[in-house]
Image (tube, helix red, strand yellow):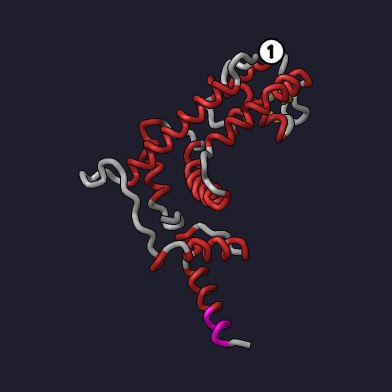
Amino acid sequence: MSYQLVREVLSLIQNFESNLENGGYAHDVEGFKRWIAAEAGQPGHAAPEPGWEGKEQGRSAESVINTLILHMNRYAKTYSKSAIYDSPFSTQEEFIYLINLKAFGEMTKMELVKRNLHEKPTGMQIINRLIEQGWVSQAGSETDRRSKLIRVTDLGLQVLGNQMEKIRQATRIVTGDLSHPEKMELIRLLTRLNDFHYPIFHSNHDPANLLDAALQSYLSPNTPK
């Protein structure tokens, strides 16, 4: 047995564990493998910075990230509009709500609204349209009489099924020519961002205080930087 190899592997594990907080990797074998793969692709443990428009003039990385995320949202919406063209759906939110109900089962109206990160008035309008179309039904909750449980109907499943192939095509196109490892890395990073913003979004801060609350979360000692 090569004890030198064992010592080197143990050293790698120590480095991996010391970077868990900053790297966002799971504390398991899969996380270790992803960390090894990332390190192997970064000569000298430091990937060269990409260039971007305005970088030399002081444009920040945060500004570029915000712009690119905004652009991706617009691209996705454009493909979604094409996917539902000449169909009974009016907006992408309608089929997204149905997909959530199909995947997660019946839930209260507010649970569905929150799952889709909508404000209450907007979410309720979408749900009411689905009810009017007969794609969703509602019934009183046995545990909370003030709440209505909604579920997707057979008609809703049929309408959704008729359009799912085009919806899947739009979903595939959004990820472009990314390789499988790149998609997995993107999921990891976006999940980490989502986990940061989700509780802030649902804390219902007044707009006047939202930035201060978000900054406090960002500066929290328990928040990875």
- Residue 114 seen in render: no
When asked about the image quadrant of residue 158, the answer is top right
When asked about the image quadrant of residue 5, the answer is bottom right
Farthest residue, direction front: 177
Does the stretch in magenta take in 147?
no
Q: Amino acid at mark 1?
A: Gln
* Residue found at x 72% / y 25%: 161
Label 1 crowding class (10 Å Cα cut-off): few <14, some 14-19, many 20+?
A: some
User: Would residue 173 appear left or right of 48 to someone viewing this image?
Assistant: right
Viewer-closest of 110 and 153: 153
* Residue found at x 75% / y 31%: 143
Q: Name the chief secondary structure element in magenta.
A: helix
Viewer-closest of 33 and 177: 177
* Residue found at x 70% / y 23%: 160
User: Would residue 104 appear left or right of 11 to someone viewing this image?
Assistant: right
Viewer-closest of 147 and 3: 3
Q: Which residues are magenta?
A: 3-8
Viewer-closest of 116 and 66: 66
Residue 162 location (% of width, % of height) = 71, 22
Task: Relative to 80, say whether 175 is above or below.
Answer: below
Q: Which quadrant would the N terminus be assigned to in this image?
A: bottom right
Does the stretch in magenta take in 4?
yes
Secondary structure under the numbered disc 1 in the rendered image: helix
* Residue found at x 58% / y 82%: 6
Total marks in image: 1
Residue 82 location (% of width, % of height) = 55, 21
Farthest residue, direction left: 57
Report which residue position mark 1 lands on.
133
Residue 146 location (% of width, % of height) = 68, 23
Q: Which quadrant would the C terminus be assigned to in this image?
A: bottom left
